[in-house]
């Protein structure tokens, strides 16, 4: 069991690294990186304006790194800060119209490419892999004290 989990983790590391390279190349024409695209996506998927700390939590990322990227996105006019009625210092992060346009363009590049990546893969296998990764993530959150 230990060898199987170790091999799975090594594959996850490799897949993560290749996913970042793939994403960087995909969205580079839009002036984005995988990290910037990921933050834009987190804002969209949150469904409402959230502070940086919540975005970082949702992504399982370091708050300081997310803050740095959000600041860069703000300086480029892709996101803006709004007052947070629940916290004076933790402003809410929102997409600007320019940010939404860039995000939608990234999705436009992504969709045809992701379709080609899924060719030959069974939906059942993809769902099983997601469940296993989610279970490992939950255990890692507990082990690191990062659970909600």
Image: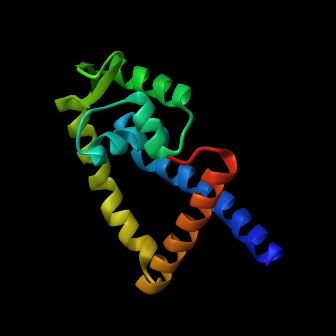
State which quadrant residue 92 falls in.
top left
Q: Residue shown at 41%/36% (left/top)?
A: 54
Tell me which corner region of the image, top left, top right, bottom left or bottom right, holds residue 11: bottom right
Residue 58 visible in the displayed image: yes
Q: Name the residue at the right extreme.
A: 3
| Residue situated furthest top in the rendering | 88
- Image quadrant occupied by the N terminus: bottom right
Instruction: Note whether 3 is above or below 60 in the view shown.
Output: below
Q: Position of residue 71 (x, y in %)?
A: 41, 20
Give the x, y percent position of residue 78: 29, 28
Q: Residue at x 29, y 52 (%)?
A: 107
Front one among 113 and 68: 68
Q: Quadrant of residue 101?
A: top left
Residue 36 in view, yes or no: no
Q: Residue 3, position in %: x, y?
A: 82, 74
Tell me the residue at 76%/76% (across/down): 4
The vertical placement of 113 against 63, above or below, is below
Q: Classify residue 139 as left or right of residue 6.
A: left
């Amino acid at each position: 069991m230990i060898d199987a989990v170790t091999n799975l983790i090594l594959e996850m590391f490799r897949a993560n690294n290749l996913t970042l390279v793939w994403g960087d190349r995909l969205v580079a024409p839009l002036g984005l990186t995988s990290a910037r695209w990921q933050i834009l996506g987190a804002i969209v998927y949150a469904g409402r304006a959230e502070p940086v700390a919540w975005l970082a939590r949702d992504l399982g990322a370091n708050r300081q790194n997310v803050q740095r990227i959000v600041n860069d996105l703000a300086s480029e006019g892709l996101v803006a800060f709004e007052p947070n009625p629940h916290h004076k210092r933790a402003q809410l992060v929102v997409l600007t119209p320019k940010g939404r346009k860039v995000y939608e363009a990234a999705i436009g590049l992504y969709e045809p490419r992701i379709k080609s990546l899924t060719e030959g893969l069974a939906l059942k296998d993809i769902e099983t892999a997601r469940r296993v990764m989610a279970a490992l993530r939950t255990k890692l959150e507990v082990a690191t004290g990062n659970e909600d």
